[in-house]
Each structure stands twice: as structure tokens, then as C-alpha cells.
Image (cartoon, rainbow, N blue to C red):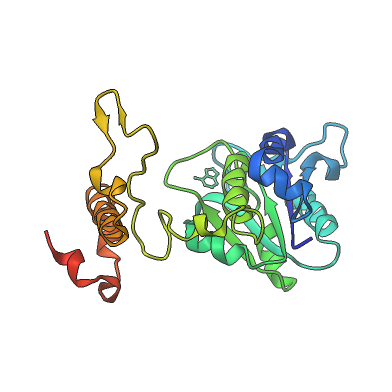
Amino acid sequence: TDVRVDVVSIFPEYLAALDISLVGKARASGLLDLRVHDLRTWTTDRHRTVDDTPAGGGAGMVMRPDVWGAALDDVMEGEPAHLIVPTPSGETFTQRTAEALAEQERLVVACGRYEGIDARVVEAHRAAGGTVSELSIGDYVLNGGEVAALVMVEAVARLLPGVVGNPESLVEESHGAAGLLEYPVYTKPPTWRGLDVPEVLLSGHHARIARWRRDRSLGRTAQRRPDLIAALDVSSLDRADLDV
Ligand code: ADE
């Protein structure tokens, strides 16, 4: 196997979706060794308690460090893996993050619920020589890290060599190296409900098609994501990009 990913959660059923489609195939073919664990396996009391009241007071509950510590120690088997903690207070997970994570041989995702995991869990992992990414999938609040874990595992898995059948489909993509959104796409029939596929795409003129696509990418990005335009490396633009 190229990559092993362990996901620990109190709702392992959430991760069932990773049996489907491309990620499911990557698992079946052995490209991805994905293991999902129930955090309650590591509880020691009759009620299988994973949380407690926050130190310092306040609303909600915090996940206990002893249960998480035992879980991570077992799952990591003495080898401190790269730990991912999905949290709305993390750094933003982007395609660049996915690319960096896809280089790792071993990832462990700790899905928190409630108000989060006792901060000493991350601290102890770092002290033991492990690395940690606390990551947010966007500026909104989910009920827990599970859905974010689904997002991250899918985004990383499709970058693993052999997972996406045609690696060229990874090249020209929204959020790719160009920093632009993808252009609109069409297929047959050439006319549908009175709407035509843009003529240039049927012209067979490869240079004109490439120019048209690049203009649509730039226009779309300017309209929908001005932040991406502002972040563009000016040296990546060609002369025609500046024509209106
Ligand atoms: N857990 C709750 N909300 C989240 C978010 N936006 N990203 C990652 N993990 C989360």
C-alpha cells in the first residue's frame, strides 16, 4: 500500500461513504489503506464517556485527553504519524494542503465533536515528535470533524498515483497551479433546448479553443473569486490575458 489513513471518530458510520466510488476503488485495489476506528473503543467506564465539562467553565463539553491519548497511541503503533485535526479554528484546507498531505505515507485524522478536543492531545503529540495540522474546510461550523474528514480524505486520495484513471484530469482543474477556476464544459448534442455549444469548441482549432477556455477561466474567476485574481502571480499571465 502507498498510503495508510486512520480516522478516529465517535460516529464511524459517517465514514461509510469512503467505501464508494473512487476512494472505495482505491481501497479495494490497495492504493489506500483506510481504517476507521470508534473512539469509544478506548473508553474505560461503563458509560463509555468521551467528554467532560470545560475547564474554566462555559457551555458545551470538551473531549477527554485520556481517551484520545490512548486511541492515538494504539492507532499510531509507536510511530508518531502526521495528525490531522479537523476544526473550524484551524488553518484553511486548500488544494495545496491536499497536495502536501498526499506526500505523507501515514495520516491519522482525529474527529472531534462538541466544543473540541482537550488541547493537550495536540501538545502531547508534538512533544512526542509528531507533526500536526489543525485544519478547517471553510468558514462555517459543522457538528463535528467527520464531514470535514470525508472532504479531506477524498481530496487527498484522488491525488494518489493510480487513483484517478487519467492523470491528465488532475492537471487542468479549478484550484490547480494556475490559480484560476475551471472554464465551462459541454458535451453532445451540439444543440439542446435551443442552446448551442459555443462554436469555437466545434471548430477543431486547438489554439483558439485554448484561448477561449483561458478567457472563460479568467472571466469566471474575476466574477466569482476576485480574491484568486488578486493572488495571481503576474508572471503567469500571457499577453492575451490582458486583452479585454
Ligand atoms: N468541525 C466543525 N466545523 C468544521 C470546519 N468548518 N472545518 C473542519 N472541521 C470542523
Q: Nearer the viewer, residue 67 or 196?
A: 196
Q: Nearer the viewer, residue 155 or 86?
A: 155
Q: Please report the residue visible at 36 percent of the width from the left and 43 percent of the height from the top.
A: 185
Q: Residue furthest front?
A: 204
Q: Is 34 rendered above or below residue 114?
A: below
Q: Residue furthest top?
A: 193
Determine whether, in the image, residue 223 is placed left or right of residue 60: left
Whether residue 119 is visible here, answered yes or no, is no
Q: Is 10 rendered above or below residue 208?
A: above
Q: Nearer the viewer, residue 229 or 241?
A: 241
Whether residue 139 is visible here, answered yes or no, is yes
Quadrant of the frame with the C terminus: bottom left
Q: Residue furthest bottom?
A: 235
Q: Quadrant of residue 30?
A: bottom right
Q: Please report the residue visible at 78 percent of the width from the left and 37 percent of the height from the top.
A: 49
Quadrant of the frame with the N terminus: bottom right
Determine whether, in the image, residue 112 is placed left or right of residue 201: right
Q: Residue furthest left?
A: 244
| Location of residue 235 in the rendering, given as x and y in whole percent from the top left corner | 27, 76
Total of numbered circles in the picture?
0
| Location of residue 2 in the rendering, given as x and y in whole percent from the top left corner | 75, 63
| Location of residue 239 in the rendering, given as x and y in whole percent from the top left corner | 19, 72
Determine whether, in the image, residue 211 is placed left or right of residue 6: left
Q: Please report the residue visible at 80 percent of the width from the left and 39 percent of the height from the top.
A: 40
Q: Please report the residue visible at 81 percent of the width from the left and 61 percent of the height from the top.
A: 76
